[in-house]
Image (tube, helix red, strand yellow):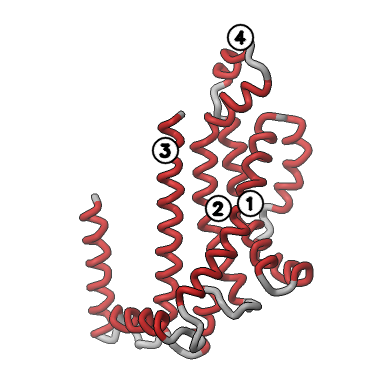
Amino acid sequence: MKKEKFLLIVVLIIIWQILSFLKVFPPYKLPSPVDVVRGFCDLLIAGTPPGYLLHKHALYSLYRVLWGYGLACLLSVPLGLLMGWSKSLHTMLSTLVDIVRPIPPLAWIPIAILWFGIGIKSAAFIIFLGAFPPILLSTISGVNSINPRLIEAAKTLHAGEKDIFFKVLLPGSIPSIFTGMRIGIGIAWMTLVAAEFTGVKEGYGLGYMIMTSRDLQLPGEIIAGMLVIGVIGLIIDKGIRIAEAKIIKWN
């Protein structure tokens, strides 16, 4: 399977290079793979804007993502477990969640800037709003999908509410929780890059770097920045999958 994946990537790069060589698209619209590699090297060595190197852009973006996404995980998972367990709490909060959930995270950017200014707090707030709903809803769905017979069996063994919550509901919800976390991290990156398009106080960020490359008409660096975001997202997703496999195996 790994060979097939690698082969597919190689084939796509070859097709890409052929299209660029034949000038099917102008270079300013679709740079060749060689131009992208050259742009990646320029980002590493010279930086965009000059002096702002790629690794710092990546670290600043990752820092913002971890703040917003981490906060979303810390709040949405416990709240989702409680809403799935308590019908009264679910009834009380579900309407509020359903109202806020359809609002695009980017629509909160003006409010975030008014409340927190331009910086890490506003970016983390926007990322939080993007990642929170899918993790919350997946957690609630995980609790609701647990076979009621398991809960009844625990009660017949004289298990208390605390034991049922931690030994039945929480372990049984873990696959759904991780699914929500994987969806949430993807949305977190999308909202971060879009938020950085509006400007960043520190002058660093992958989204800000891509926008600057556009203003400087550097399409190779734009594609290189996009690929860096994809690779970082892939690594994080792989880490979540590894953690999920170990925890589910333990269960």
Q: Please state which amino acid type lies under the numbered disc 2.
A: Gly
Question: Disc 4 vs disc 3: which is toward the camera?
Answer: 3
- Labels 4 and 2: the sequence-earlier one: 4
In percent of width and height, residue 227 lies at 40, 70
Check disc 1: other Cα within 10 Å, few if <14, some if 14-19, many if 20+: many
**Relative side of 41 to 190, left or right:** left
* Res. 184 mark: 2
Q: Specify the amino acid type for callout 4.
A: Thr
Q: CA distance from mark 1 to mark 3?
A: 22 Å
Q: Tell me the residue that label 1 is attached to.
A: 72
Q: Which residue is mark 3?
A: 246
Element at label 3? helix
At a point 40% along the width and 64% down the height, the residue shown is 231
Residue 128 location in percent, x, y?
A: 64, 57
Q: Residue at x 46, y 29 (%)?
A: 251
* CA–CA distance in space, label 1 to label 2: 9 Å
Q: Are marks 1 and 2 in contact (CB under 8 Å)?
A: yes
Rendered position, 99 above or below 112: above
Q: Earlier in the sequence, mark 1 or mark 2?
A: 1
Q: Is residue 237 left or right of residue 61?
A: left
Helix, strand or loop for disc 2: helix
- What is the x, y in percent for residue 48? 48, 84
Q: What is the C-alpha distance between the residues marked 4 and 3? A: 30 Å
SS class, disc 1: helix
Q: Nearer the viewer, residue 65 or 176?
A: 65
Q: Earlier in the sequence, mark 1 or mark 3?
A: 1
Whole-number angstrom distance, CA of label 1 to CA of label 4 = 36 Å
